């Protein structure tokens, strides 16, 4: 397996939890997955806001930006964080750290980089 970072364009299908899909990809590849950007729509999202409050939003939301890193780990909760900015149908922006689920309501297209895990 290559020790160099590799860029991937991946598609997440409708109805799939993006957080879990990236966790499974990191586990399968044995590499960290860094999300550089993405586009598409999500319909259910649970976010930890800057205040620490956890909020679940239902409805259709457009991804404005998404970034973060997921590493192979024993649990999704300890695998890393994804930060998103989403637009509501009324053009309000909601943002926070994703707490699974983040469910795709359209195909999601992500640009990611996978990197080998290195010992510190």
Image (cartoon, rainbow, N blue to C red):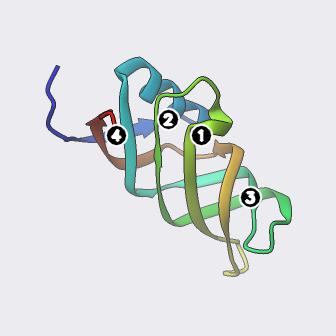
Furthest residue toward front: 120
Query: Would you call the spot at circle 2 few (<14 residues within 10 Å), some (14-19), or many (20 or more)?
Result: many
Give the mark nearest the N terminus, 4 or 1.
1
Give the mark nearest the N terminus, 2 or 3.
2
Q: Secondary structure at mark 2?
A: helix
Give the mark nearest the N terminus, 3 or 1.
1
* Residue contact at pointers 4 and 2, CB within 8 angstroms: no
- Write down the residue under mark 3: 47
Q: CA distance from mark 4 to mark 2?
A: 23 Å
Q: CA distance from mark 2 to mark 3?
A: 17 Å
Query: Residue 53, which numbered label?
Result: none
Quadrant placement of the C terminus: top left
- Write down the residue under mark 4: 120
Query: Residue 19, which numbered label?
Result: 1
Q: Which one is closest to the eye, mark 4 or mark 2?
A: 4
Q: Secondary structure at mark 3?
A: strand
* Residue contact at pointers 2 and 1, CB within 8 angstroms: yes
At x 42%, y 56%, the residue is 38
Q: Which one is closest to the eye, mark 3 or mark 4?
A: 4
Q: CA distance from mark 3 to mark 4?
A: 30 Å
Q: Position of residue 48 (x, y in %)?
A: 75, 61
Query: Would you call the spot at circle 4 few (<14 residues within 10 Å), some (14-19), or many (20 or more)?
Result: few
Query: Residue 22, which numbered label?
Result: 2
Query: Would you call the spot at circle 1 few (<14 residues within 10 Å), some (14-19), or many (20 or more)?
Result: many
Give the mark nearest the N terminus, 3 or 4.
3
Q: CA distance from mark 3 to mark 1?
A: 12 Å
Q: Secondary structure at mark 4?
A: loop
Q: Position of residue 5 (x, y in %)?
A: 19, 41
At x 36%, y 38%, the residue is 10
Give the mark nearest the N terminus, 4 or 2.
2
Quadrant placement of the N terminus: top left
């Amino acid at each position: 397996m290559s020790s160099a970072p590799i860029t991937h364009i991946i598609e997440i299908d409708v109805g799939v939890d993006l957080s879990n899909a990236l966790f499974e990809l990191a586990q399968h590849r044995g590499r960290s997955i860094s999300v550089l950007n993405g586009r598409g729509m999500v319909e259910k999202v649970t976010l930890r806001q800057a205040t620490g409050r956890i909020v679940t939003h239902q409805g259709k939301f457009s991804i404005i930006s998404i970034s973060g890193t997921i590493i192979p780990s024993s649990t999704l909760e300890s695998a890393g964080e994804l930060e998103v900015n989403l637009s509501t149908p009324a053009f309000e922006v909601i943002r926070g750290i994703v707490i699974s689920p983040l469910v795709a309501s359209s195909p999601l297209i992500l640009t990611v980089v996978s990197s080998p895990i290195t010992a510190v």
